[in-house]
Amino acid sequence: MYIPAAPMCEKNLAYAHKVKAALEKGASPGDFPREDYETNWEGRFTLADLNIHGKRALGMDV
């Protein structure tokens, strides 16, 4: 679970890494129903589509 009041605490960073891994695969993140229907979608949103704020939120280097 993401805690907005402490965006870069250890728990949030661990969650962000899990969300990033799911996004890379097109999978549903762990706190959503396991549908994974975007896995094979052409043109789906990917890590390359993230802006600087999205990258920071997922703990990526910017």
Image (spheres, grey):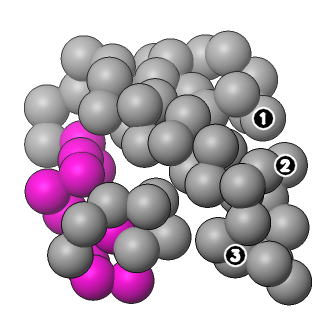
Q: CA distance from mark 3 to mark 2?
A: 11 Å
Q: Residue at x 27, y 82 (%)?
A: 52
Give, as a single range, the part of the protein colored magenta.
44-55
47 sits left or right of 26 in the view: left
Q: Residue at x 43, y 61 (%)?
A: 59
Residue 54 versus residue 42: which sits nearer the camera? 54
Which residue is disc 1 drawn over? 31
- Disc 1 to disc 3: CB gap under 8 Å: no
Q: CA distance from mark 1 to mark 3?
A: 17 Å
Which residue is disc 3 drawn over? 7
Q: Name the secondary structure under disc 2.
A: loop
Q: Which mark is residue 1?
A: 2
Residue 36 versus residue 60: which sits nearer the camera? 60
Label 2 Cα neighbours within 10 Å, binned few <14 / some 14-19 / many ≥20: few
Three-letter code for the amino acid on which mark 2 is drawn? Met
- Disc 2 to disc 1: CB gap under 8 Å: yes
Q: For marks 2 and 1, give the one nearer the viewer.
A: 2
Label 3 Cα neighbours within 10 Å, binned few <14 / some 14-19 / many ≥20: some
